[in-house]
Structure formats: C-alpha cells, structure tokens
Amino acid sequence: MSGRQCARTGLWVIEDFRYGYRIATTSWGPMNPLPRLAGDDPASWNRYDTPGSTIYLADTEEIAFAEMLSSFALKLGEVHPLQKDADFLGLSLEEYMAELAGEWDGQQNMQPGFLPRHWRDRRLLYRLGLQAPGWWVDVEHPDSIAAISGGIGKQLSDGAGLERLTLGVLHGENRTATTLIATWLRSLTLDDETEPVGIRFRSKHGGGYSWAYWLRRADTGLTGDPMTADDGTTIESNRPSLLAVTSRFNIKIW
C-alpha cells in the first residue's frame, strides 16, 4: 500500500495524486466551489467539506459522472416513468424515447431517470492537476481511522452520536461526522511541517477514488493555487464514460 504514516499525527498520508476529473458549470468554473461558513448546518454540505472552499475530483471520468449523476438514478425497484407509455404503444423504452427526443424539450424533464440536454450544455468536464507535491490523508486507512478516533473521538461521540468510527461512517450520510473529521484534518500540521492538501476516499459508487482538495490560498484571499485546470471539454451525449454511467443508473439521455 502506497504512502506512509505521519509520525506526528498517526495519519496515513499519500502523495501519488497527479491529475483528476471534475464536472462543473461553466458559470462557476472548476475552481470556484460554494464556500462553506463556520457555524452553518452541514446537513447539505458535501462529504468532506470544511469551513472554506473544497473541490472534489475523481480518478476517472466515469467516477466523476457517477458522483454527479447519482441523484438522477431511479430508486431500487422503481420503474422508469415512461415505461408504461412505451408498453402501451408496444415499443421498447429505448424506441419510445427515440421518438420523443425530437418533440420534447429536455428542459421540461428534470426528474429521476432522465438527463436533460441543458444539464450537459451548462457544464464541462475538466481535467485538473496538482503542480506541486503535497500530502493527502488516506482517510479510510486503518491508521487514519485510529488517529481520528484518538484525536476527536469525544467530539464525534458528543456531536455526531457515534459509538465508533468505521468505514460505514466514512461511506455513510452522516455529514456532521464527515465534515467534523475533515475540519479537524484540515487544521493539522504534519511531521514535515506541511499541511495536508486534502483527503482521498473511495467513491461510494465503486471503481476507484475521489479526492477532496482544500483551496487554502483562495480562502485567505491569495492567488496561485497549485491545483490548476484545463479549459474543459464539452459533454456530448455519446461520450463513452457518460454512456457507461447512465447505463448503470438506467438514466435516459436527452
């Protein structure tokens, strides 16, 4: 397993990140997340947000699409909304969707099972790279779990209602717990006198890792962040990584 244990914190840290993928609206761009404010309710925050600014990246395009499109997926056992109409006409769902595509404005279709065209038109797929070395906390490594439990165990018990810290918590939806962990990790200094640049964690949809990167310079009003982005790529309906994810999630693309 790559990485090392930090002698000061006990955390397992790695530095093998080179580049990642991020989907963002063109109006905001890839490096301008919504800043979080201390004292706000973290229920609506992303998994490892902290007060300040956090951006999320993925190892692969597929993971980036999976993280973004999970909210469009149908619930377990749920039938696609148009399946009954297709059955009535004696068509497959794909055939029925193809007939509708020329008539139905995708902007009217923001509901599970559909990916409207305007969702793609408003976004680009960006490739981001880290231009300077930096340590990431491998939050799911046993040494990191032990260090977090020892460092803020009481806060996690009192504030997030945890009896113990496990992978189930780290993969779960308890945002009080995960954002508390992230905020504590962001505050630390490692044994080489540097600060961790962010957190590595497995995507809950499988297939690889996601990364939470803290925009420390931007949060203090500075420029020149070592994470940089390209100009972005348009998201075409036939992009293989998009098709792979929408197929798994049973999402129809307009």
Image: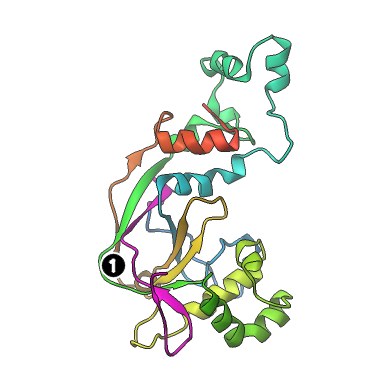
> Left of 63 or right of it: where is 149?
right
Q: Percent from the top left, x then y, of residue 188? A: 45, 84
Between residue 131 and residue 139, name the one nearer to us.
139
Using the rendered view, name the quadrant where residue 115 is placed.
top right
Check if residue 25 falls in the magenta segment: yes
Q: Is residue 27 visible?
A: no
User: Looking at the rendering, in which quadrant would you find the N terminus?
Assistant: bottom left
Using the rendered view, name the quadrant where residue 164 is placed.
bottom right
Q: Percent from the top left, x then y, of residue 201? A: 50, 63
- In the image, residue 97 above or below residue 64: above
Q: Percent from the top left, x then y, of residue 24? A: 43, 48
> Left of 146 or right of it: where is 137?
left
Between residue 160 and residue 2, name the one nearer to us.
2
What are the residue bounds of the magenta stretch? 1-29
Q: Residue at horizontal 60%, vertical 69%?
A: 178
Q: Residue at horizontal 33%, vertical 73%?
A: 134
Q: Is residue 177 visible?
A: yes
Q: How many numbered discs sit on the rendered protein?
A: 1
- In the image, residue 121 above or below residue 214: above
Q: Percent from the top left, x then y, of residue 184? A: 53, 80
Q: Residue at horizontal 45%, vertical 44%?
A: 62
Q: Look at label 1 and name its amino acid.
A: Pro
- In the image, residue 128 above or below residue 218: above
Q: Secondary structure at mark 1?
A: loop
Would you name the residue on which mark 1 appears? Answer: 226
Using the rendered view, name the quadrant where residue 136 is placed.
bottom left
